[in-house]
Image (cartoon, coloured by chain):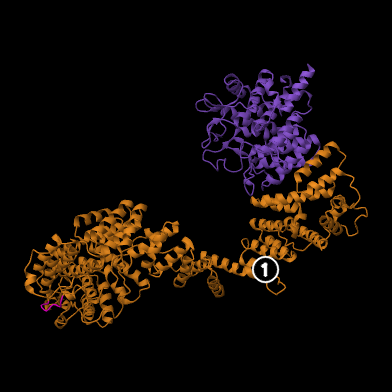
Chain colours: A purple, B orange
């Protein structure tokens, strides 16, 4: 029996598939899985590569990379990714991170606008790493970015405190139907940390606004949030013009963010359960907001892992066997896989 | 050597650090004084000299870097000397690897290795020197990234945080810092940074490049200080010599864009020389624009031409076209303008301007058909109202009344509020005596256009006339004779200001001191100058019988056709009752001994063979019918000639019909049947030159007839219309003056009388006397 297990393990390794051994790991992201992720998506300079997107990098990928490196306890890897992030992207006058870096352009930064989820992730990862590893420079940098987010991206709009997706292009000043928001940029687990780093900003209220908007944005027959919404002060929330009116690759990570933050809001989570677990066999799907129809089922293990972790959190369902090993596919679902794994490992170890 | 150089660079680094850091920290301080000893704290921290890099380079046998490092450490620690066991074995292989990664530029790898080792061995600290160098290297990259993304505050913050990078060795960073200062409106500091470079950095190419970097950021005055730091090479040649021309170009370019600025003549001379030296279009093009925008269109022409010949592209063509047009050579400009019209919006505009200035030129030129035929599709395509209007005026001024009507109507279709087109249309109705349509236009436009109303309302006309004259006096044409010749046709409202044939940016590209309006050829014709009209008057409104007998030849279409005004004693102005000045001062009779009909180039030569051939009438070829018509005209039998001409119009070729229609209208004119003549002239399309002449004649005739019938306003309108086409000569000016007199516009009448009298015109003196007498009777004196 034991021999058998070892043999199959060996076989898996030989095939390049790394089983996730959460039980034995002391870190939420197993080091072997993280090494596989790094080998697939992180280059020597510390750039985290979006393989499905022209091999560009962005503040989000760098932030995810840093958070995963921290969750895997990889100080060397964390420092490598941070070095690239700081040198190449942390160049904005306002202290925020430029969001887009293209290896095929000179200069590489092709859009100097900021994206709030990238900044939140980077600041959050720095803060957690700095605290865990007792490294003050990380905490200093985390604080500077947190303050810059609070100053430039958290704004009052009407009676609401909102998180703009970027510094330019989304506010009421920039668009008639503004503000345009992306609710999947509200990474709830970061807000308590931001509150410690930059207490001058009212992060708890921002968090509450996010939850309120998530309820208001349950649109269409499927009651799912469009990736991009127009949320005018005093008006009703609608899918934003100029963006596909779908529950898509952005919004599908909202459940992960809520659960990672320990928010078990049944009203919000229920619509994901219905769409993913009841109607689509455990997989998230891209759903047309107006009709509630499924446009595309997402079967990559990374996406299925979102469904599995939701089932685990709501129903204590064990993670299916085929999702207990990590094989890098594309950057985005692979990232979601490891973050989901860390969620289950940290909060719901009973599902493993 | 390299050791020395490295030491120098480090010292320079030490000097610039406080210089620039001070500037950042202390706003308002000029802060160029190199501070000394401000690195004291750093030095204290490095009391124990870090030799790890030194040992690494030694172990690698990298003597270049080793020497540099020794020099660097000596500069930092004057008391230090290299250790004796430099080439001994390195004990820390991990650290050695880190240095290797560092020298390979793999900074992320070094960072990663340091962090990994610290994780494994919390007691280990990386060498401060390695960290300092990593910081500097990363800062270099980050500063460049920030600068590339125009994040100037970040550039300046990084320079402040890591001033050690600001050395001549990193001159690119110094440039970027200088730029960041300039971009954040800190010009003094920007100049300080450039000054620092030119004072301290010695690489010849980099020094030149420094000035090139400064040029787009600083103005001429600011650059002056930097140019003063110029050095001379071994041969005594100033190092920035090659930039002088660049500076001239820049000055000239700025002055070409903003004509308020000028450049010294030396600059112009230099640019002329440069333009001739090379075969590139850039310099002559720049020169052309500069000259053109500084009132030297004639000089600019040659340079635009040169640029165009050197394939200087649309801007060259645009300049050349504008200059030609400005110089009144629109006919030459038109083909070039047409060729380039689609290459840029400016070229299209230049083309439209050129053609419009052709169409509205005074006097109207006879345009090649191709000019019109390729212009009209453009006008129609663009629904270009001023173009349609311009075509309307051209047709109108060349006597193509139906064509003019069509264009004015088209213009009004596109823009129902285009007053000049409405006015043009009204004039065409007036010309064809289509009173119904004329009145309709007057009804529609009455509230908006007084000059349209003036076509039917003498009171309005007199008022406009009175308003108009003072305006003329303010203009450049102060000659009394010219002012006297000014008639109605006030400039339209300036709704078409943008459509003037003037390039607005071109200063001095204004031919008159008043704005250029798109109007019929202005009545003020500078060609009518004192002394132009000479000889005996053909028109004498006073009782001067001897004058009437005098031969006269001035007014084509009048004199040559033998219309002689014969004043009668009964109509002498002195006898006129002031209460009822409705007198007919002239009478026209046909001169028996009329001069031979004038012949025009376009008129077929007629054989002066036999009268029998002429009188045979009807039948035969249309060509011979035309010939017979002319023969009958020679015999002063115009009514019979009409018959011949009619035959040719009906059966002849287009050419015959044209000649015949012309002959027919002349024949009617001979009989004083102006309306019939007008209609006849429209029976076949006339070539523009002949048509213009005919129109002029017809209008003069109409004016005379109208005057005779005591329809003075109509006489004035006819005179106005005629003077669009040809200068008004003294006989017609007298007719005009008497018309004014008869509508009680004594002021206008007197102005003309006086002006003509001043030229020695005795008849005009009579007019002056008449005015005086009238005023006396009215008790004005």
Residue farthest to the top, as pictured: A1
- Relative to B764, say whether B514 is above or below: above
Comparing A44 with B321, the one in front is A44
Q: Chain of mark 1?
A: B
- Bounds of the magenta span? B591-596
Residue B480 % position (x, y)? 32, 76
Quarter of the image where one finds residue A182: top right
Along the horizontal axis of the image, is B115 left or right of B613?
A: right
Residue B141 % position (x, y)? 71, 50
Comparing A35 with A213, the one in front is A35
Is residue B226 visible in the rendered image? The answer is yes
- Relative to B702, say whether B377 is above or below: above
Point 66% across, 37% down: residue: A60
- Relative to B435, say whether B671 is above or below: below
Quarter of the image where one finds residue B781: bottom left
Which residue does the numbered mark 1 point to in the structure image? B225
Comparing B770 with A20, the one in front is A20
Dominant secondary-structure state across the stretch colored magenta: loop
Membership of B424 in magenta stretch: no
Point 33% across, 77% down: residue: B479
């Amino acid at each position: 029996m034991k021999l058998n297990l070892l043999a199959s393990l060996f076989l898996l390794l030989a095939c390049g598939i790394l089983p996730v051994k959460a039980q034995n790991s002391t870190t939420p992201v197993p080091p072997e899985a993280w090494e596989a992720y790094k080998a697939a998506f992180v280059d020597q300079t510390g750039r985290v590569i979006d393989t499905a997107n022209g091999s560009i990098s962005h503040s989000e990928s760098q932030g995810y990379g840093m958070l995963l490196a921290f969750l895997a306890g990889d100080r060397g890897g964390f420092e490598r990714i941070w070095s690239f992030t700081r040198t190449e992207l942390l160049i904005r006058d306002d202290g925020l991170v430029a969001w887009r870096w293209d290896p095929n352009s000179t200069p590489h930064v092709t859009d100097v606008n900021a994206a709030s989820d990238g900044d939140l992730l980077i600041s959050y990862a720095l803060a957690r790493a700095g605290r865990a590893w007792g490294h003050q420079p990380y905490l200093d940098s985390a604080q500077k970015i947190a303050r810059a987010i609070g100053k430039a991206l958290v704004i009052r709009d009407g009676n609401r405190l909102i998180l703009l997706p970027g510094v330019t292009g989304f506010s009421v000043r920039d668009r008639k139907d503004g503000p345009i928001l992306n609710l999947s940029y509200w990474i709830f687990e970061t807000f308590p940390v931001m509150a410690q780093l930059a207490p001058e900003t009212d992060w708890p209220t921002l968090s509450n606004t996010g939850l309120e908007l998530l309820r208001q944005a349950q649109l269409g027959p499927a009651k799912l949030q469009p990736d991009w919404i127009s949320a005018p002060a005093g008006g009703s929330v609608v899918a934003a013009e100029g963006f596909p009116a779908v529950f898509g690759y952005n919004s599908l990570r909202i459940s992960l963010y809520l659960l990672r933050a320990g928010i078990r809001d049944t009203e919000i989570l229920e619509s994901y359960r219905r769409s993913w677990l009841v109607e689509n066999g455990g997989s998230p799907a891209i759903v047309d907001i107006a009709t509630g129809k499924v446009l595309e089922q997402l079967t990559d293990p990374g996406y299925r892992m979102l469904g599995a972790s939701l089932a685990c959190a709501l129903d204590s369902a064990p993670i299916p066997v085929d999702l207990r090993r990590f094989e890098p596919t594309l950057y985005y679902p692979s990232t979601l896989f490891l973050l989901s794994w860390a969620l289950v490992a940290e909060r719901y170890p009973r599902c493993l | 050597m390299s050791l020395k150089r490295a030491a120098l660079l480090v010292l320079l680094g030490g000097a610039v650090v406080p210089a620039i850091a001070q500037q950042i920290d202390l706003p308002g301080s000029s802060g160029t004084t190199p501070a000394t000893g401000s690195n004291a704290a750093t030095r204290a921290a490095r009391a124990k000299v870090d030799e790890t890099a030194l040992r690494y380079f030694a172990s690698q046998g990298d003597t270049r870097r080793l020497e540099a490092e020794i020099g660097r450490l000596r500069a930092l620690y004057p008391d230090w000397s290299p250790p004796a066991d430099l080439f001994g074995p390195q004990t820390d292989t991990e650290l050695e690897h880190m240095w290797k990664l560092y020298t390979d530029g793999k900074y992320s790898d070094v960072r990663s290795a340091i962090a990994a080792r610290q994780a494994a061995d919390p007691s280990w600290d990386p060498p401060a020197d390695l960290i300092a160098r990593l910081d500097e290297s990363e800062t270099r990259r980050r500063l460049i990234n920030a600068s590339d993304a125009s994040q100037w505050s970040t550039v300046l913050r990084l320079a402040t945080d890591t001033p050690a990078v600001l050395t001549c060795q990193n001159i690119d960073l110094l440039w970027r810092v200088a730029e960041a200062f300039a971009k954040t409106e800190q010009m003094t500091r920007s100049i300080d940074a450039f000054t620092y470079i030119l004072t301290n950095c010695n690489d010849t190419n980099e020094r030149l490049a420094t000035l090139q970097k400064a040029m787009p950021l600083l103005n001429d005055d600011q650059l002056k200080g930097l140019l003063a730091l110029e050095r001379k090479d071994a041969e005594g040649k100033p190092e920035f010599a090659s930039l002088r021309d660049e500076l001239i170009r820049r000055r000239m370019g700025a002055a070409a864009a903003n004509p308020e600025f000028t450049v010294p003549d030396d600059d112009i001379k230099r640019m002329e020389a440069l333009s001739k030296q090379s075969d590139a279009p850039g310099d002559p093009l720049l020169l052309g624009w500069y000259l053109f925008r500084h009132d030297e269109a004639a000089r600019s022409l040659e340079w635009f031409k040169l640029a165009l010949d050197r394939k200087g592209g649309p801007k060259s063509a645009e300049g050349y076209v504008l200059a030609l047009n400005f110089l009144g050579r629109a006919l030459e400009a038109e083909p070039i303008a047409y060729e380039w019209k689609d290459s840029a919006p400016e070229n299209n505009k230049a083309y439209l301007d050129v053609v419009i200035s052709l169409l509205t030129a005074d006097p109207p030129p006879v345009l090649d058909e191709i000019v019109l035929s390729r212009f009209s599709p453009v006008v129609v395509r663009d629904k270009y109202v001023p173009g349609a209007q311009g075509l309307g005026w051209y047709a109108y001024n060349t006597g193509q009344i139906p064509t003019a009507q069509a264009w004015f109507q088209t213009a009004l279709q596109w823009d129902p509020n285009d007053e000049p087109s409405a006015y043009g249309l009204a004039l065409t109705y007036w010309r064809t005596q289509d009173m119904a349509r004329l009145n309709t236009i007057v009804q529609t436009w009455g509230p908006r256009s007084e000059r349209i109303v003036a076509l039917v309302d003498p009171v309005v006309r007199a008022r406009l006339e009175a308003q108009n004259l003072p305006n003329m006096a303010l203009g450049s044409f102060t000659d009394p004779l010219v002012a006297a010749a000014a008639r109605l046709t006030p400039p339209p409202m300036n709704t078409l200001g943008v459509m003037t044939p003037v390039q607005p940016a071109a200063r001095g590209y204004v031919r008159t001191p008043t704005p250029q309006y798109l109007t019929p050829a202005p009545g003020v014709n500078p060609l009518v100058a004192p002394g132009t009209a000479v000889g005996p008057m053909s028109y004498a409104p006073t009782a001067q019988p001897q004058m009437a007998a005098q031969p006269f030849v001035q007014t084509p279409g009048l004199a040559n056709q033998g219309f002689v005004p014969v004043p009668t004693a009964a109509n002498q102005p002195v006898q006129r009752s002031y209460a009822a000045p409705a007198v007919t001062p002239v009478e026209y009779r046909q001169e028996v001994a009329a001069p031979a009909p004038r012949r025009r180039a376009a008129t077929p030569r007629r054989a002066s063979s036999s009268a029998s051939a002429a009188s045979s009438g009807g039948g035969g070829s249309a060509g011979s019918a035309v010939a017979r018509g002319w023969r009958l005209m020679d015999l002063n039998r115009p009514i019979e000639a009409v018959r011949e001409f009619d035959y040719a119009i009906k059966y002849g070729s287009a050419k015959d019909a044209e000649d015949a229609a012309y002959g027919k209208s002349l024949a009617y004119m001979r009989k004083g049947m102006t309306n019939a003549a007008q209609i006849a002239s429209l029976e076949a399309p006339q070539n523009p030159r002949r048509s213009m002449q005919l129109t002029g004649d017809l209008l003069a005739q109409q004016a005379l007839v109208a005057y005779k019938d005591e329809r003075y306003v109509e006489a004035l309108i006819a005179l106005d219309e005629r003077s669009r086409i040809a200068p008004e000569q003294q006989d017609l000016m007298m007719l005009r003056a008497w018309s004014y007199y008869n509508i009680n516009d004594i002021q206008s009448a007197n102005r003309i009388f006086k002006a003509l009298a001043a030229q020695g015109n005795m008849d005009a003196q009579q007019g002056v006397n008449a005015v005086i007498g009238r005023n006396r009777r009215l008790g004005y004196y």
